[in-house]
Image: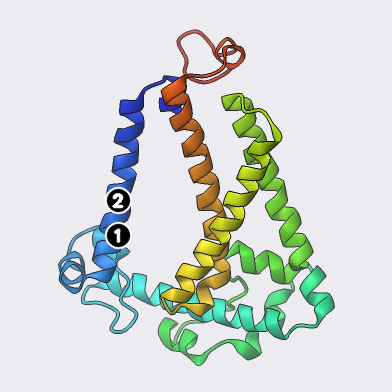
Amino acid sequence: MAAGFNRSQKVFVAIGTLLATVIAILALINTQSAAQRWAQDVPVLSRLVYNLESGGSSAATSLASRSTAARLGIWEAATETFVEAPAKVRLIGFGPESSYTHYYPHLPDRVMQVDGYWQSNSYDRFHADTLDIALNYGLLGWLVYCGFFAVVVLAAARALFGLTGAGVNWLFFAMSVAGAGAGTGLARYAGLSSAMAPAAGLGIGGAWLLFLMACSWRAARRGLPDGIRSKARPGSCWPA
């Protein structure tokens, strides 16, 4: 956004390149065996390596892998709880802060095996807003939650970049749906069916980020409307 308001394509490209590089490194150290073995002994990077089969060779890698495995098990239990819940519960949920009392029968043994039997854990959170809200407040609650933030993000984009017309709303909605579908599809393709619901939420957030990035790139190329530019404080790249 700073690049957009300053109409600096170079800054935009530099930031975009940095983000793309970080994503590429994360993908590389988790998909290529040689890169994974190297990263397991590198500070910081070792905490970002996820090896669900062996847990990795370093303490940091093992911690990250066990944390990931535990979450996958919890997400699986939450998903099964939602699927087997009555239709009414799917719509309105089990009630605030109560869904975790219903998902213990579905909790895989491997969650405790991963965390260690010596630990005392209640597992009262799903570590994924998509599942937490859907089970506590139902699909209707999740739609309200997601819709609220969608309106906030869209309104902010309109105000910051001077967007007009109904076409912007439809584009934002289409990107949100596409993001949810992409996240779900990628999780299924990777064989992580238990991560499909959290991936859908992550995909929606990613779509909103791409929407704001597109607005910033457009502003960096074409500039902002005069009405928006005149509201900016002198010497600042942000509107007053």
The residue at 57%/65% (across/down) is 128
The residue at 58%/87% (across/down) is 107
Q: Amino acid at mark 1?
A: Leu
- Give the percent coordinates (x, y) of residue 157: 60, 33
Q: Is residue 196 left or right of residue 142?
A: left
Q: Quadrant of the C terminus?
A: top right
The Cα atoms of the two marked residues, 1 and 2, are separated by 6 Å
Regarding mark 1 in the picture, which secondary structure is present there? Answer: helix
Q: What is the crowding at mark 2: few (fewer than 14 residues within 10 Å), some, or many (at least 20)?
A: few
- Give the percent coordinates (x, y) of residue 5: 47, 22
Q: Which residue position is annotated with label 2?
A: 22
The residue at 69%/31% (across/down) is 165
Q: Is residue 23 left or right of residue 32?
A: right
Front residue (pair 238, 173): 173
Residue at the right extreme? 88
Which quadrant holds residue 130? Answer: bottom right
Front residue (pair 235, 100): 235
Relative to residue 12, is residue 6 depicted above or below? above
- Give the percent coordinates (x, y) of residue 213: 47, 38
Q: Is residue 120 left or right of residue 130?
A: left
Relative to residue 215, is residue 71 depicted above or below? below
The residue at 21%/77% (across/down) is 57
Disc 1 vs disc 2: Cβ atoms closer than 8 Å? yes
Q: Which mark is residue 119?
A: none
- Give the percent coordinates (x, y) of residue 189: 44, 75
Relative to residue 214, is residue 94 depicted above or below? below
Q: Which residue position is annotated with label 1?
A: 26
Regarding mark 2 in the picture, which secondary structure is present there? Answer: helix
Q: How is the image coloured?
A: rainbow
Front residue (pair 59, 238): 238
Q: Amino acid at mark 2?
A: Val
